[in-house]
Image: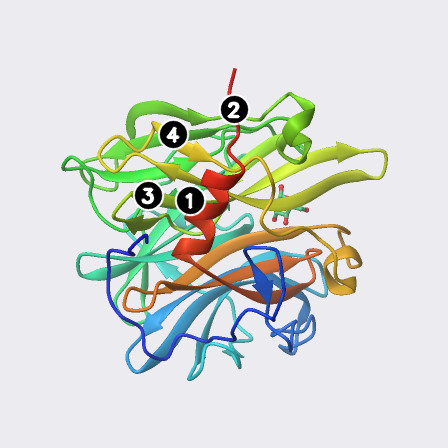
């Protein structure tokens, strides 16, 4: 039995696995939890991140406006299912106007590290790179330096320092709809300078696991377990109708997270529901956050559906670790 290392979360949203259901991840019965027009200006609300905050929850949401501009917005919730999302994008403060200048922002992640919440997102700076900011209260957000040079659009922090350094997974890319992408690990002593980059894992070219043959990227912040870091990630297949985004999971070494202990050959969730298959970008499930309850091993995954609405799905640490062991990917 795997154990989540972390805090209990009694009010984690939850539904039991439907009787006889064979997949390791099951959807919330009332999905999608956030509709495309749930703020006054939104065209779509998806690929968003949530965390426990005070006696409820807070989050940073990707809302594309009806101008189809991409930005990130704060939201709050009592139950992590019904969200009150701001109509105004986050206004960052910081030391350097050059960095504060907004081009576009999307695909946020949020994680609590030490004494504050950090937000990372895909930040336009002469091409996509990874923006970083911190907040204590979800009111004032202090933006730090971008982590990398362009092009990189998928940066995900670990929830604690590893070997004395902050740690981030990312997916270097190009300036288009990147037809490649592997996951790398980077380290920083101060959230400012990032280096000591390590290769973690890449696409799989054999047909045994074609769903992750075009590109892969980290999803929610890695979940610490007694067996290593549990990573939920997206994997992409290029088809005659374009990219299809599915979800998979892997287990990374506790002290050297660039070493992969196990990885699932089979996906854990694929676009099968109408709201995942139809939308502004069809056939996308894109996980960006996971709430966890260390007392029960429960995990609630938040994911974007067809780049249009936000879905919620459930699993447990045991379901995912067993899936990796039952259907391992054999790297050659
Ligand atoms: C990725 C990002 C995501 C999006 C996905 C599918 O490259 O842009 O925001 O969900 O493509 O369109």
The numbered dot on residue 330 is 2
Circle 2 sits in a helix, a strand or a loop, which is it? loop
- CA–CA distance between discs 1 and 4? 10 Å
Mark in front: 2 vs 1: 2
- Quadrant where the N terminus lies? bottom left
Residue 312 in the image: state x and y as whole percent: 56, 67
Circle 1 sits in a helix, a strand or a loop, which is it? strand
Q: Earlier in the sequence, mark 3 or mark 2?
A: 3
Which quarter of the figure has residue 22? bottom right
Q: Residue at x 70, y 34 (%)?
A: 237
Q: Residue at x 55, y 47 (%)?
A: 103
- CA–CA distance between discs 4 and 2? 12 Å
Question: Label 3: few (<14), some or many (≥20) within 10 Å?
Answer: many
Question: Label 2: few (<14), some or many (≥20) within 10 Å?
Answer: few
- CA–CA distance between discs 3 and 4? 9 Å
Contact (CB < 8 A) between labels 4 and 2? no
Q: Earlier in the sequence, mark 3 or mark 4?
A: 3
According to the image, label 4 marks what residue?
Answer: 260
The numbered dot on residue 229 is 3
Residue 321 in the image: state x and y as whole percent: 42, 47
Mark in front: 3 vs 2: 2
Question: Label 4: few (<14), some or many (≥20) within 10 Å?
Answer: some
Answer yes or no: is residue 63 visible: no
Residue 294 in the image: state x and y as whole percent: 29, 64
According to the image, label 1 marks what residue?
Answer: 231
Residue 279 in the image: state x and y as whole percent: 78, 59
Q: Is residue 109 above or below residue 8?
A: above
The numbered dot on residue 185 is none
Q: Earlier in the sequence, mark 1 or mark 4?
A: 1
Answer with left or right where residue 142 lies relative to residue 264.
left
């Amino acid at each position: 039995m795997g154990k989540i290392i972390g805090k209990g979360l009694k009010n984690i949203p939850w539904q039991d696995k439907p009787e006889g259901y064979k997949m390791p991840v099951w959807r919330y019965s009332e999905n999608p939890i956030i509709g495309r027009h749930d703020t006054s200006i939104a065209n779509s609300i998806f690929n968003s991140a949530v965390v426990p905050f005070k006696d409820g929850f807070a989050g940073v949401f990707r809302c594309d406006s009806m101008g189809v501009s991409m930005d990130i917005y704060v939201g709050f919730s009592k139950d992590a299912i019904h969200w009150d999302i701001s109509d105004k994008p986050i206004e960052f403060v910081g030391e350097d106007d050059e960095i504060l200048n907004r081009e576009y922002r999307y695909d946020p992640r949020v994680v609590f590290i030490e004494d504050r919440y950090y937000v990372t997102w895909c930040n336009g700076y002469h091409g996509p790179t990874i923006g970083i900011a911190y907040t204590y209260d979800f009111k004032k957000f202090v933006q730090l330096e971008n982590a990398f040079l362009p092009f990189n659009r998928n940066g995900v922090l670990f929830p604690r320092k590893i070997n004395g350094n902050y740690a981030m997974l990312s997916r270097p890319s190009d300036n288009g709809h990147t037809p490649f992408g592997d996951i790398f690990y980077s380290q920083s002593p101060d959230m400012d300078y990032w280096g000591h980059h390590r290769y973690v894992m890449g696409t799989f070219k054999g047909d045994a696991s074609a769903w992750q043959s075009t590109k892969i990227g980290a999803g929610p912040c890695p979940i610490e377990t007694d067996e290593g870091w549990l990573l939920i990630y997206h994997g992409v297949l290029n088809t005659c109708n374009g990219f299809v985004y599915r979800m998979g999971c892997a287990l990374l070494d506790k002290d050297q997270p660039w070493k992969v202990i196990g990885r699932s050959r089979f996906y854990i969730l694929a676009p099968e529901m109408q709201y995942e298959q139809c939308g502004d970008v069809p056939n996308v499930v894109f996980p960006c956050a996971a709430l966890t309850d260390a007392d029960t091993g429960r995990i609630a995954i938040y994911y974007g559906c067809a780049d249009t609405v936000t879905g919620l799905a459930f699993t447990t640490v045991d379901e995912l670790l067993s899936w990796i062991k039952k259907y391992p990917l054999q790297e050659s």
